[in-house]
Amino acid sequence: MDIAEEIGNTTLLVRCLALLPFVFRQRGQVEEVQAVITRALAMPEARNKSLLSKGIRAWIGWRDSNLVEAEVLWPGIT
């Protein structure tokens, strides 16, 4: 990810930002998932992956016991 930023390869950076949440989710690292999603949503190129980010944000809501937010973002998650 650092190299992608360094050389300005946004395609590679978006791919990294799309895959990192899965690693952090497996580890139960909610704050790290939130940070990656926030960073990804700040990039116009990554916003096209809205279904992915909605699912991950629903997972964050579910992990934080915010079931209303989780249900709004991903109906049927609860």
Image (cartoon, grey):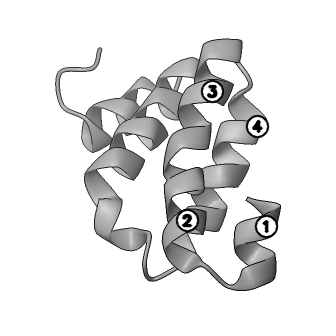
Q: Indicate left or right for 44 with 48 as reference.
A: right
- How far apart marks 4 and 3 lie (CA) works out to 13 Å
Residue 64 in view of the camera = no
- How far apart marks 3 and 2 lie (CA) works out to 17 Å
Q: Earlier in the sequence, mark 1 or mark 2?
A: 1
Q: Secondary structure at mark 1?
A: helix
- How far apart marks 1 and 3 lie (CA) works out to 19 Å
Q: Amino acid at mark 4?
A: Glu
Q: Indicate left or right for 21 with 18 as reference.
A: right
Q: Residues within 10 Å of mark 2 (few under 14, many from 20)?
A: some
Q: Residue at x 50, y 56 (%)?
A: 15
Outermost residue, left side: 76
**Residue occupied by mark 4:** 31
Quadrant in which the N terminus is drawn: bottom right
Q: Secondary structure at mark 4?
A: helix
Q: Is residue 29 above or below residue 56?
A: above
**Residue occupied by mark 1:** 3
Q: Amino acid at mark 3?
A: Val
Q: Residues within 10 Å of mark 4 (few under 14, many from 20)?
A: few
Q: Amino acid at mark 2?
A: Leu
**Residue occupied by mark 2:** 12
Q: Residue at x 41, y 50 (%)?
A: 53
**Badge 1 vs badge 2, beta-carbon distance below 8 Å:** yes
Q: Nearer the viewer, mark 4 or mark 3?
A: 3
Q: Earlier in the sequence, mark 1 or mark 3?
A: 1
**Residue occupied by mark 3:** 23
Along the viewing direction, whichever of 75 and 54 lies nearer the viewer: 54
Quadrant in which the C terminus is drawn: top left
**Badge 1 vs badge 3, beta-carbon distance below 8 Å:** no
